Amino acid sequence: MDRSNVVPEFTHDWVTHHTPIWWTHLARFADRKASALEIGCYEGRATLWFLQQVLCHPDSTIDCIDPFEPYAQTGDFGLSIEQARAHFIANTSGYRDKLTLHTRRSQDVLPQLASLGRAFDFIYVDGCHLAADETLTGRGSS
Ligand SMILES: C[S@@+](CC[C@H](N)C(=O)[O-])C[C@H]1O[C@@H](n2cnc3c(N)ncnc32)[C@H](O)[C@@H]1O
């Protein structure tokens, strides 16, 4: 799909207030091949920002991990998890050539990526922020 034909649809903004500091650290990747990992992508707002602002090189890629299943922190988000997944798919549809979605929990995907020798230029951890899940995610990425 032509990237310019996609009109993204978001209900939440956990991104805009971070972008000045993200840009400070990530601008150096904008003109070269880079690989990113995002843990917890929801509607794809951060994913799209990374793709449009940082992962501009034709060979740059992003791997996204999100199980899109009910979890302890979805209560206040408003969207059903099926709606969030549908928004993610639609919002990132212009970047299928650069994006790999792993529809499983980070605790399960990270050891697999590590065993494949995958490495990333930057990682955005924004999945479940409950202590038990954060700890498991941290162990999986070590
Ligand atoms: C705050 S939202 C992410 C927002 C997104 N990064 C953005 O900037 O728009 C948290 C997401 O983490 C996902 N999540 C929950 N537990 C997870 C886990 N164990 N591994 C990966 N993602 C998880 C949820 O499904 C949800 O979509």
Image (spheres, rainbow, N blue to C red):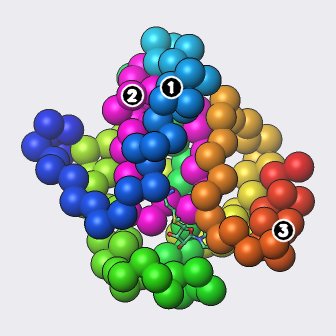
Between circles 1 and 2, the one closer to the viewer is 1
Q: Amino acid at mark 1?
A: Trp
Q: Earlier in the sequence, mark 3 or mark 2?
A: 2
Q: Amino acid at mark 2?
A: Gln
Q: Secondary structure at mark 1?
A: helix
* In the image, residue 54 lies in the stretch drawn in magenta: yes
- Bin the neighbour count of mark 2 within 10 Å (Cα to Cα): few under 14, some 14-19, many 20 and up: some
- Circle 1 is placed at which residue position? 23
- Tell me if residue 9 can be seen: yes
* In the image, residue 134 lies in the stretch drawn in magenta: no
Asked whether disc 1 touches disc 2, contact meaning CB atoms under 8 Å apart, the reply is: yes
Q: Residue at x 14, y 37 (%)?
A: 4
Q: Earlier in the sequence, mark 1 or mark 3?
A: 1
* Residue 68: image location, x then y, percent: 49, 76
Instruction: Give the CA distance from mark 1 to mark 2.
Output: 8 Å
- Circle 3 is placed at which residue position? 136
- Tell me if residue 111 can be seen: no
Residue 31: give its label: none
